[in-house]
Image (spheres, coloured by chain):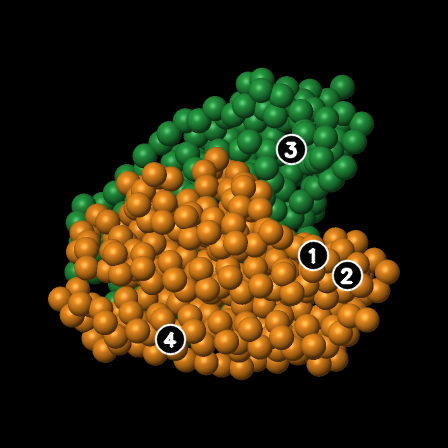
Chain colours: A orange, B green
């Protein structure tokens, strides 16, 4: 018989471990940044626990936000949560397994990084494990270069990011890079502007190959692939000075990121409607934005 | 028999006239601003026409954007449009009169003003005339003070704005101030933050008292009430100097305005989904915003 309790514990523990490793990697970059471009002291992540109330008013788990507001990373959030309860009636039809039994359990990690330097791409990572009458993993990671000239699939940052995600998928029979890449391009798309949010990456959901250990190994690999590639991309661009015009372009491009997250992102809408923590959900919004 | 052609022409002509008067009033304030606080030359509105394609691909009317980026008004938009066509099947159930006949015609004016000085409130005005198998007016105006200390119903700006809207309603038997004020409070509310967007005003929709001339007279009065009260409120606060902290508070408060418009505003969602002009719809977003 499947031991869900053990799986839940393993998934939660991994998300916490990954959070610690991502925070450490970003703090190291804060520390090592060239002083000629990045003034002030290197910043550290600040952690804040929160508790969730279910729609019935009962305790429903909670999470921990970790926010860094620094010299390299103008705003970075790395959040974990482990929540449980009952889906409100209006959501049950949309969630696999929730039609028959509204109880759910979910754990996950979300990371969103908005660097100060317009040459350094922004990035997003999310992985989660969801248990209803069914159970599955979901998540992905995608890159958002801020300057138009860096937003080509042939750009060396985009190429390296895609290669890292392809390697992560190719190592696991349960994953399909082609499918997940296409899903990512489809998902992170601003229909009203007919333009992608960034250069893509991978996106997957409802992953349940019936080999839980294999699925979980892939999900861990997405996290470690992120940990290898993103700091590399930051380091590549960290010493490139930027102009006032490039900062302006970055601030306007960030507006498109806001438009995506508030108009289209399922996680944002879902979190706001299911009693998620507003501060951590909206911590994805960039620190400074322009719609000139 | 009802002459819809004449009503449409009268409504469209009024929205254009009101647009001209609002633009002139805001340009006058740009011109008269005290030079000690507002540097640079006074700005003028720039107009840009756009054409709409219906969901079938047929021509569907269009509109004219007017944008001012100035020293008093960091960003102001006053837009008119006259559009027509066929509602796409997914919208027909939501629109009165569209179930039986998908053809529609609509004209309207929208104004959104984001002043530079955090002491000067932002404002929004919208009025529209919609014709399906039914026909009605809708619209309203609401005030958004940016500083917490000015966001009380007892504040003198809020009091004056509410009084102006009450007078406009009280002069017309077809309007109910109590109802429209409550509707405004309900509509401009950020559920995820459990807070109102601003201090309210009036909001009405589906106004069809069966006396078209009376309904139209009220809608015109909403426009003229706006023209009387908003420049007064600007003038009251225009000479108050602001601190860096007040500017910061303004930029953060503007983030809530963005959250409302992208998460909740029916007009924004409707416009983006029905082939409206993306530039004019999203011109409501403030010029500079922070989510620190």
Q: Are marks 1 and 2 on the same chain?
A: yes
Work out which residue is located at the far right of the displayed protein and give it.
A100
**At 78% across and 70% down in the image, what residue appears?**
A2
Q: Residues within 10 Å of mark 4 (few under 14, many from 20)?
A: some
State the CA–CA distance, disc 1 to disc 2: 9 Å
Q: Which mark is residue A208?
A: 1
Q: Position of residue B145 (x, y in %)?
A: 44, 63
Letter of the chain that mark 1 sits on in the rendering = A
Letter of the chain that mark 3 sits on in the rendering = B
Taking A90 as reference, is B37 left or right?
left
State the CA–CA distance, disc 4 to disc 1: 31 Å
Letter of the chain that mark 4 sits on in the rendering = A
State the CA–CA distance, disc 3 to disc 4: 57 Å
Q: Position of residue A146 (x, y in %)?
A: 33, 49
Q: Quadrant of the C terminus of chain B?
A: bottom left
Of callouts 4 and 1, the N-terminal one: 4
- SS category of the residue bearing label 4: helix
Q: Are marks 1 and 3 on the same chain?
A: no
- SS category of the residue bearing label 2: loop
Compare residues B118 and B292 and report the one nearer the observer: B292
Residue located beneath label 4 in the image: A24
């Amino acid at each position: 018989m499947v031991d869900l309790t053990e799986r839940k514990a393993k998934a939660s523990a991994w998300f916490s471990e990954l959070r610690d490793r991502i925070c450490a990697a970003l703090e190291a970059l804060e520390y090592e940044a060239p002083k000629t471009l990045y003034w002030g002291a290197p910043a550290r992540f600040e952690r804040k626990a929160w508790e969730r109330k279910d729609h019935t008013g009962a305790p429903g788990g909670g999470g921990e936000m970790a926010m860094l507001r620094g010299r390299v990373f103008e705003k970075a959030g790395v959040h974990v949560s482990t929540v449980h309860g009952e889906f409100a009636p209006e959501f049950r039809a949309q969630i696999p397994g929730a039609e028959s039994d509204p109880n759910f359990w979910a754990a996950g990690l979300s990371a969103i990084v908005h660097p100060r330097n317009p040459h350094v791409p922004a990035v997003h990572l999310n992985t989660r494990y969801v248990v209803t009458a069914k159970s599955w993993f979901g998540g992905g990671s995608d890159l958002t270069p801020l300057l138009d000239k860096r937003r080509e699939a042939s750009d060396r940052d985009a190429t390296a990011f895609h290669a890292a995600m392809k390697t992560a998928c190719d190592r696991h029979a349960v994953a399909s890079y082609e499918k997940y890449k296409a899903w990512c391009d489809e998902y992170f798309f601003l229909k009203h502007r007919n333009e992608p949010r960034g250069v893509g990456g991978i996106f997957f959901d409802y992953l349940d190959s019936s080999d839980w250990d294999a699925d979980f190994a892939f999900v861990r690999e997405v996290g470690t692939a992120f940990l290898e590639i993103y700091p590399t991309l930051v380091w590549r661009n960290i010493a490139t000075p930027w102009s006032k015009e490039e900062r302006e372009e970055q601030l306007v491009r960030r507006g498109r990121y806001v438009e995506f997250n508030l108009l289209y992102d399922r996680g944002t809408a879902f979190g706001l409607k299911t009693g998620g923590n507003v501060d951590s959900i909206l911590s994805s919004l960039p620190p400074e934005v322009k719609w000139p």
